[in-house]
Amino acid sequence: MLKSKLKHLKSWVILLLCIIVILPAVWFLSTRFEGEKPSIMLTPSSAFINASQDITVSVSDIKSGVRKIWIGLLKDGKENVLLEKEFPKAGLHEESFKISIKPKKLGISDGKAILRMVARDFSWRRWWHGNKTYIETAVTIDTHPPDVDVLSRSHNISPGGAGLVIYKLSESCPENGVNVGGNFFPGHYGYFKDADIYMAFFALNYDQGAKTEIFVRATDQAGNIKRAGIPYYIKRKSFKKDILNISDKFLNWKTPEFDVNAPPGSKTPMLDKFLKVNRDLRKANYCKATEVGKKTDNVLYWKGTFKRLPKSANRAGFADQREYKYNGRIIDHQVHLGVDLASVAHSPVPAANSGKVAFVEYLGIYGKTIIIDHGFGLHSMYSHLSCFDVQKGQMVKKGEIIGRTGITGLTGGDHLHFGILIHNTFSNPVEWWDASWIKNNITSKIHSIESR
C-alpha cells in the first residue's frame, strides 16, 4: 500500500517537473522561433523623389525585435545605400528614421528607379537569420521643376478688385495657381483646347496694398515648385467710412432671431447678444460662404456683364468701414463685404449671370442666401432674401428670377446684399457690372490666347 502511494507520488512529481521544465522550454522556443515578419512603413508613400526629398521609414517588430534595417535606391544598375543600421541583441521593437535623399549629390540622374527596403528580426528561424521583410517600390526621380509660361501680359488691380492670369504648364501639376500675398487661388484647365493652359481668377483683399506680392506657383507630382512672376500694377484705393447707430428698438426686433446667449450676469443682454452675432456669427458665416466658394466647376458658365438688381439704389458699398454706435459710444467695427441694393419690398432678384446654384440656405447674419457658381472659382452671392425660387444644383440663366428681396438676417430694411466671391475672397461687385472693365481685364485676355 505504501509502495503504491510512493509510486503514485513519484509519478506526480515527475509530471510536475516536466511541466515546470518543458512548458517554459516550449514557450521559450516558440518565442525565439516566432514567424511574424517585421513591419516597414514609408511616409510619404509617393511614387516620386524630387531634388531634395525627405522620407520617414518606420520599422517595428513587437515580438523578437528588429535586428537590422537596410534602405537602398537602385538606378541604372547601381545601388545607393540610404540607410543601414544594426541593433543590439535586446532588439528594437519600434523606431522611425528620417532620410534625406538628394539625387544629384548621390550622382543619380532623373528617371525610373527602385527603392528597396529590407528588415530582419531576432527570431531563430532560417538558421538564426530571422524573419525578413523585403519591399521594392518603383519610383520616379524628378529633380526639375515645371516650366511656367505666363501668357497674359497686363494685370492692373485695386484693393478689393479682381484679375485673371492665364499661363501654360510644361507638365501635370496637382497644385497650381496664383499666390496673392500668401492667399492661393487655384488655376483651372478645360477652357482652351490646349489642356496645358490654365486660367486663375484672383482677388486682392480690401486691405492688401501696393506691396502685395503676386506670382504664379506650380507644384509638380514630385513636389518640385516653380514660381513665375507676372507683370502687375496695384492701384491705390480708399474705402468709405460709415456709422451705424444701433437702437434698442432694433435690438429688441432683431436679436431674438439668432440662437445666441448673452454672457452670464450681463447687464445689457440684448446688446451683448448683438455683439456676439455681429462678431462671432459673422465670422462663422463668412467661413461658410468661403468654403462654398472653394468648390467650383471647370466650366465658364457666365458671359458678359453681371446684372444689377433692376431699378435699385445703392445703400452701402463694398468694403465700407462700418462703425457701430450705441447710445453715442462706439461698440464695434466691421467691414461690409458686398453692395446693398434697395428697390421696392420683395423685388424679384435675377441671377446676375448664368451658372449653377451652389448654395440655398439660411446663413446667419446674411439671412436667406443663394450662391451661384459661375465656374473657374467665380461665385455671386444674394442675401437677406424673403424666399427662394431655385434649388441647389439647378442651372440658371442670366436674368432668371432666383428669389425676392427681404429683411432676413441682420438687416433693418428690405434690400439685397450682393457679393462677388473669388475662391475664398470677396471682391468688389462694381467691377463685374462694368462692360469696359470685363473687356479689358477678362475677355480680351481670353480672346488673345484663343486667336494664337
Image: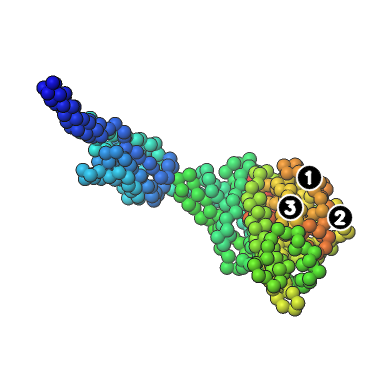
Few, some or many residues within 10 Å of mark 3 (<14, 14–19, 20+)? some
For image coordinates 57% across by 43% down, the residue present is 196
For image coordinates 88% across by 59% down, the residue present is 344
Quadrant location of residue 180? Answer: bottom right
Identify the residue under disc 2.
Answer: 346
Where residue 397 appears, x then y in whole percent? 79, 45
Please state which amino acid type lies under the numbered disc 2: His
Quadrant location of residue 64? Answer: top left
Where residue 186 appears, x then y in whole percent? 59, 51
Q: Which element carries disc 2, helix, strand or loop?
A: loop
Residue situated furthest front in the rendering: 1
Decide if residue 322 is in sight here: no
The answer to whether 162 is drawn above or below residue 323 in the figure is above
Q: Tag on residue 390?
A: 1
Please state which amino acid type lies under the numbered disc 1: Val
For image coordinates 24% across by 38% down, the residue present is 122
The answer to whether 119 is drawn above or below residue 338 in the figure is above
